[in-house]
Image: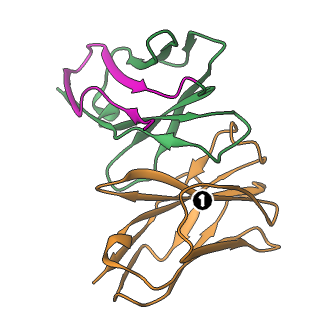
Amino acid sequence: DSGVTQTPKHLITATGQRVTLRCSPRSGDLSVYWYQQSLDQGLQFLIQYYNGEERAKGNILERFSAQQFPDLHSELNLSSLELGDSALYFCASSPRGGAGNEQFFGPGTRLTVL
Amino acid sequence: GESVGLHLPTLSVQEGDNSIINCAYSNSASDYFIWYKQESGKGPQFIIDIRSNMDKRQGQRVTVLLNKTVKHLSLQIAATQPGDSAVYFCAEMGSRSNNNDMRFGAGTRLTVKP
């Protein structure tokens, strides 16, 4: 158990819908990262927050957005969902903002878009 | 385009043998490399990292070798155990402090036979 929690574990929705994935980092970690893992694209970095502020941006679509709240939990919002958005979404956290710090991954949320 | 890739998608070894998992990268500007282990149904787990100013780094039963001349990274696991069965990913970044360009390889599935 990494100490990072993600909810929900599974999510099934329809195309065009909007969903919110939630992540609680390890106690004391200030930085949160979001990743997408799909069969055809593999694991991809989406976005990073540090202490409430966006720190780094990867291959995140404009339909997707995220935020980190004062209590340091984070949410990833996915809108206008398409079939290709079906994937595992992982959240990771690290104590500090530098990407080189070890990142601890949560168990993931499996999103299925029908 | 530039990419991170793995030579072998699957690797099967006998328990007690040493395992070697390979990774090729094409971005000569990559400065920082990480190996992750992902067990079935779980998120990736950090194993070991290495910076481009090093060519070898050792951990507990694991060694990472970096050959910048041929842009090749390998993970060696000594005395492989059944618990080592998982998918192993390499990841590269342009800078240890910047997650913006973090990219992952496709992954190699390691199976340990008893």
Q: How is the image coloured?
A: by chain
Question: Which chain identifier belongs to the orange chain?
Answer: A
Total number of numbered discs in the rendering: 1
Question: Which chain identifier belongs to the green chain?
Answer: B
Q: Nearer the viewer, residue B84 or A38?
A: A38
Q: Height in image: B104 above or below B22?
A: below
Q: Is residue A21 magenta?
A: no
Three-letter amino acid code at the position of disc 1:
Val
Q: Residues within 10 Å of mark 1 (few under 14, many from 20)?
A: many
The percent coordinates of residue A7 (x first, y second) are: 52, 75
Query: Mark 1 — residue?
Result: A4
Residue in the image at 40% along x and 38% along y: B105
Q: Nearer the viewer, residue A23 or B102?
A: B102
Q: Nearer the viewer, residue A60 or A36?
A: A60
Which chain hosts label 1? A
> What residue span does the magenta drawing correspond to?
B1-28
Question: In which quadrant of the rendered image does the C terminus of chain B lie?
Answer: top left
Residue in the image at 75% along x and 54% along y: A29
Whether residue B13 sits left or right of residue A17 in the image: it is: left
Whether residue B12 sits left or right of residue A72 in the image: it is: left
Quarter of the image holding residue A4?
A: bottom right
Q: Name the secondary structure under disc 1.
A: loop
Residue in the image at 62% along x and 74% along y: A65
The percent coordinates of residue B33 (x first, y second) are: 56, 28
Q: Is residue B9 magenta?
A: yes
Residue in the image at 28% along x and 26% along y: B7
Question: In which quadrant of the rendered image does the N terminus of chain B lie?
Answer: top left
The percent coordinates of residue B28 (x first, y second) are: 55, 23
* Outermost front residue: B1
The percent coordinates of residue A49 (x first, y second) are: 73, 60
